[in-house]
Amino acid sequence: MENALRKNPKISKFVVCSDIGGDCQGGDRLSNLPEPIIHHIFSFLETIDVVRASAVSRRWRYFWLSIPYLNFNIHNIWSNLLERWSLEKINEKFKDFVNWVLLSQNGSINIQRFLLSCFNCVDDYTLYRWLSAVAQRNVQVLDLDIISEEPIKLPRCLVTCESLVSLKLDFGNREHQGVLNLPTCAGFSQLKSLDLQHVEVLDYNLFRKFLSSCPLLENLYMKECFFRDFKILDISTTSLKYLTIDEFLLSEPKGLRSCEVICESLEALKLHFGWGIDKCVLKPPPTSVGFSRLKSLDLKHVEFLDHSLFLKLISSSPFLENLIMDSCLFPDLRILDISSASLKSLTLDRIEFGGDELGSYKLKIACPNLVSFNFFALLLPDITLEGLNSLQNAFVFLEDIGEHMEDIEICHRLSKILNGLCGVKVLKLSCTLYEILNASLEEGSYFSASFNNLKSLILCVTMAEWTVLLIIRLLNCSPNLEALTIYFDADEYFDEWKISNKAILCLTCHLKTVDLVEFKGHENELELVRFLLKNGYVLQKLRIRWLEDVYNHREIISRIMKFPRSSSSVRLKFLQPKSSFDFCEILR
C-alpha cells in the first residue's frame, strides 16, 4: 500500500506563455517576488496547476512541496475524464494524486487552507486518512465538498484540532443532502466560522451540544440543510455574531417549522425559508432579552404569530440599520408600524397579511435616519411615510393597482407615497403605477411638491399613451435631474407618441446622461430619442442597449444619427443586448 501511495501519477503538461519562463531574456519578475507573495498568488490555483507550474521555472521546481494552500477538485483535475476512464478509475487516480502530494510535501509546514471536492465510497477510509494528515499539520481552514454513499463522521483528530478556525461542509445539492454524524466529544475550541450546506442533521440534542462546544464561534451559515424531525431549531450561544439559515431553494421545507434564536451578541441575522405553504415561525424564547447588537435583519418566508413579537424584535435592536422582509406573514395584523431611529435601509417585499387580498392593510414607516427604501407589493396598500428626512434612494414596484378601489382612493394613496419621497436623490418606479400616477401628477390637489433633490430617475415603461405624458411630467417635477434610465417593457403598442419641444429645466441645465435599455427601435422610442437630443442642451452621454432579436440595427442607427442635437458634446453609444434581465432584480 505504501508503494501505491508513493507512485507518481501522470499529470498533463502546464501550458504557459513563452515569456513567463525563468530563462526568458526579459527576466522572470514573478519568480523574483518574495516567497509569501508567490504563495498568496498560487493560493488561487488548484494544486494540480501548482504542480504543473514546476516545469515553468527552476525556482518553482519544488515550490509545490512547501505551499501551505492545497486545493483538490476531482471535477477539474483532468479534462475530458469520462472519455478516457470510468468513474471508478477517475476516483482511484484522484486518490493517488492527493496521496502523492500529501506524502511528498514537507510535513513540518502548517496547512493554512485545505479544499477538497471528491466522492466518498462505502468502506473507503481514504477521506479520514486525509483529514488526519491535515489535522496533524495544524490546518486552519478546511473546506470539504463531498458526495458520500454513507454518513460522514468528523474524526476525533479533527474535532480536537486546536488550529482549525474555519470549517465548511457541503455534502450534496438541492435534491440530496448527505448525513453528518455529529461528534459526541467536546472540541473545536478555536473554531470561529462554521458553514454547513446540503447537510442532514439527525439528532437535535447533539446539534445543540455541538454548537455549545464551540466557545469562539462567530459565524454560522446553514444552507439547504435537512433538520430531520426537528420541531424547533434552538440556537443559543454567547459568541455568535453572524447567523444565516437559508432554505430558500428547497422545493419544500424539510422538517423545520419553528426557529428560536437567543444570541444577544448577534450583529447579523438572516433567515430564508422554503417555498412550502407553511412558513417557518420565528419566536424568541421567553428568556430572550432581544438583540442589543443587531445591525442587519433579513427575513424570508417567516411568520409572526403575534405582532407584538415583531415590535419587540425591532424595539430591542437599538443599532438595527438594515431590515429586509420578503414574503413574511402577519396573520392577525392590519396595521404594520415600523418605527426605528437607527434604521438606514428598509426593503419590504410582498408582505402578507392574513386573508388580505385587497391591499386593505396599512403601513406606517417612521424612520428619521432611513437612507434607502425599497417597496414591492402585489397591490397598492395605504402607506404613511413620516419624517423620512434622510431618505436618498427609493424604489416602488407594484404588480397591480387593483380594480377594487376607486380612482380617487388610488390617487390619494399614490400621492401620499410621492409626497413622502419628494426629497430623494434616486427614484425608481415600475410601469404598473403610470396611468394613475399620471393622473395624480396632473391633479395638483393630489401632488403639489417637486423632486428638487432628485439626481437619478429610473423607469420601467410600456408604450401606453399615458407613459410619455408621465415621463414629461416627472421631468418637469425634477428640475435638477442629472441621469435618466428607461427600461422598455412593451408587449403592445398604443397611439403614436408626439412630444412637443417645450423647455424643461432639467433638460436645459442639468441632464447629462440618458440610458435606454431593451431598445427595439419602435417609432415611439425613436420619438423619445429625438426629443431628448433636441432638448438636452447639456447632454453628454446617450447610451442605447438593444433588445435581443433586433436585426435592423444599421437602419435604426442611421435614423438616430440624423436627429438634430442641441448639445455639441453629446456622445451616442449603442450596446449589445444582455441575454436576460429583470427590472425588479437589477434595481434591488
Image: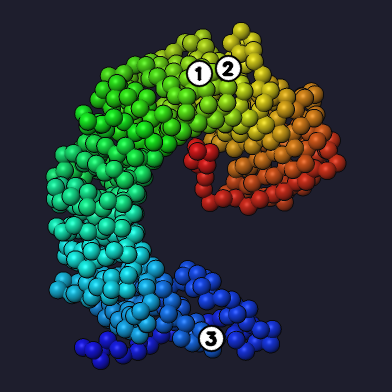
Where residue 208 appears, x then y in whole percent?
19, 47
> From the viewer's perspective, is the residue at label 3 or at label 1 nearer?
3
Q: Is residue 562 left or right of residue 22?
A: right
Where residue 125 appears, x then y in whole percent?
19, 74
Residue drawn at x 34%, y 33% is: 291
> From the viewer's perspective, is the residue at label 3 or at label 2 nearer?
3
Mark 2 lies on residue: 419
Mark 1 lies on residue: 385
Where residue 273 appears, x then y in whole percent?
30, 40
Q: Is residue 484 left or right of residue 347?
A: right
Q: Which mark is residue 340?
A: none
Q: CA distance from mark 2 to mark 1?
A: 8 Å
Instruction: Answer with the quarter of the image where residue 8 lies.
Output: bottom left
Q: Is residue 475 left or right of residue 201?
A: right
Task: Confirm whether residue 267 shows in the render.
Answer: yes
Badge 1 crowding class, 10 Å Cα cut-off, few under 14, some 14 to 19, many 20 or more, is some
Could you tell me the amino acid type at mark 1?
A: Leu
Residue drawn at x 62%, y 82% is: 28
Q: Nearer the viewer, residue 66 or 372?
A: 66
The local secondary structure at tag 3 comes to loop
Residue drawn at x 16%, y 39% is: 231
Determine whether label 2 and label 1 are within 8 Å by CB: yes
Instruction: Answer with the quarter of the image where residue 239 lies.
Output: top left
Question: Mark 1 or mark 3, which is nearer the start of the sequence?
Answer: 3
Mark 3 lies on residue: 59
Number of labels in the image equals: 3
Question: Mark 2 or mark 3, which is nearer the start of the sequence?
Answer: 3
Residue drawn at x 42%, y 22% is: 338
Could you tell me the amino acid type at mark 3?
A: Arg
- Its colouring scheme is rainbow
Could you tell me the amino acid type at mark 2?
A: Asn
